[in-house]
Amino acid sequence: MPPISTSTCPQDLQALAPTPPSSPLSPLLSVASSGGPASCQAPQTERTRFMDRRGRFKQSLGRFNVYRKGGDWRKIYWDDPFHTVINTRTSRIIWGVFIAYFFIILFFALAYLDVSVRHPTCHVGLSSIMEAYVFSLETIMTIGYGAPTDDIFYGGCTSIATLLTLESFAGIILDSVCIGIFYARFSRANQRANTIMFSNSAVIRKIRGHYYFMFQTCERRKHQLVEAHVRLYAVRHEAEDDSDEPHDFMFQCHQMRVQQPDDDCGAMLLMVLPQVVVHRIDQWSPLFPPECLPQDGRDSKTCASYPDPTQRQVDIDNGNREGGLPGAPKIYQEPTKMQIMNHLRRSGLEVVVILEGIDSSTSNTMQARNSYTDDDIVWDATFERCVIKTPRGLCIDFDRFHLLKPAPMDAQRCVMPSQF
């Protein structure tokens, strides 16, 4: 077995690939590490991603590239005005607040001016719209510059008392709404997701005869997430065979079982240290080539069968679930590296990662998202160590977080099997 190199240069990873760079499969063998030379980066192809990767450090902003049309969408949105306003742009909210205050102040200014002109006995003392506007502004904001006349009780006029009461009440309501909207926006956990780091590239490597899909994640802040857990989905971009439209695709989501951390235990993560999430490409995996599955009918106990729930081969191997006798012949074929590569390229699979947790400071639920396409996958590689022991404690070097190094073609004879 060849020794494992500790080099972090992407050229070393590309040297492991049997496919020449001119092959259409070469994007699967490239490394999208941060800080690498331009010649080592994966070539960008024109394709529609289900999720963006336009954030800093090639991270996702968590936005799904999904647009909706048709139906009475305006009525649907305004049936829930609070969340419609909360999720709108900040510039629209600011302009909306300004316009609301302006028209309320202007409305009461006209009312004060009308009372001042029609009822001189009220001693309002307003002679122009500008004076009335300033008086209305002082009233709603409780500025207290003073009354327009010496009669602070306005001659006991009922109309002025009513207008002052209504404007004060309108100011309280409008202030409460504005404070609630801005607090809800500032306290949202959306921006908290930006501190969750995902590795730029995912890797697929063979361990003890089986292929595994892996990526790395970690928390950038020292304030950790509570009850952090991860889920994986595969989105198919494969076109329908009987479709006449070139852009008619089968965008279907398939659940991907997680082996490490075990999703039977909730797939819980300790985000204080970098965590490697592992998915085994078994016969239930969406990454498993369909040509390796039995074509004469499928049993949900041995392979994927819609609409039965997704299983895991590791549960059968460990005796946690029935799925055939030990040593029984397999009804499926073990996929080769080339078959998996062809399947990923042909189907356009995109792995969507959803990491959820509760922020310990605000108790808000946070959801960080990322995705990996075939252009983001590196074969026969592993992640460089980015945790360093210092006298002050453990130090996570995020400059090395995205770096990869070559891995053995099959790690079944690895010196440290617990480290994959």
Image (cartoon, helix red, strand yellow):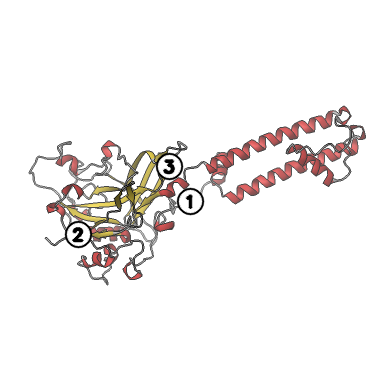
The percent position of residue 84, horizontal first and vertical second, equals: 55, 43
For the residues carrying marks 2 and 1, which lies nearer the camera in this image?
A: 2
Which of the two discs, 2 and 1, labels the residue nearer the N terminus?
1
Residue placed at 83% from the left, 32% from the top?
Answer: 160
Task: Inspect the image, locate mark 1, and give the three-letter code of the amino acid beneath it.
Answer: Arg
Q: How many marks?
A: 3
In the image, residue 413 lies at what x, y percent?
12, 53
* Left or right, 374 with reference to 145: left
Q: Earlier in the sequence, mark 2 or mark 3?
A: 2
Of tags 2 and 3, the one toward the viewer is 3
Q: Where is mark 1, residue-wise?
A: 68
> Which image quarter: residue 162?
top right
Secondary structure beneath label 2 = helix
**Residue 27 versus residue 37: which sits nearer the camera?**
37
Return the residue at label 3: 366
Using the numbered discs, state the Cα–Cα distance from disc 2 to disc 3 in whole angstroms: 36 Å
Q: Residues within 10 Å of mark 2 (few under 14, many from 20)?
A: few
Numbered tag placed on residue 337 in the rendering: 2
Residue 250 at least partly seen: no
On the image, the x and y values in percent for residue 242 come to 32, 58
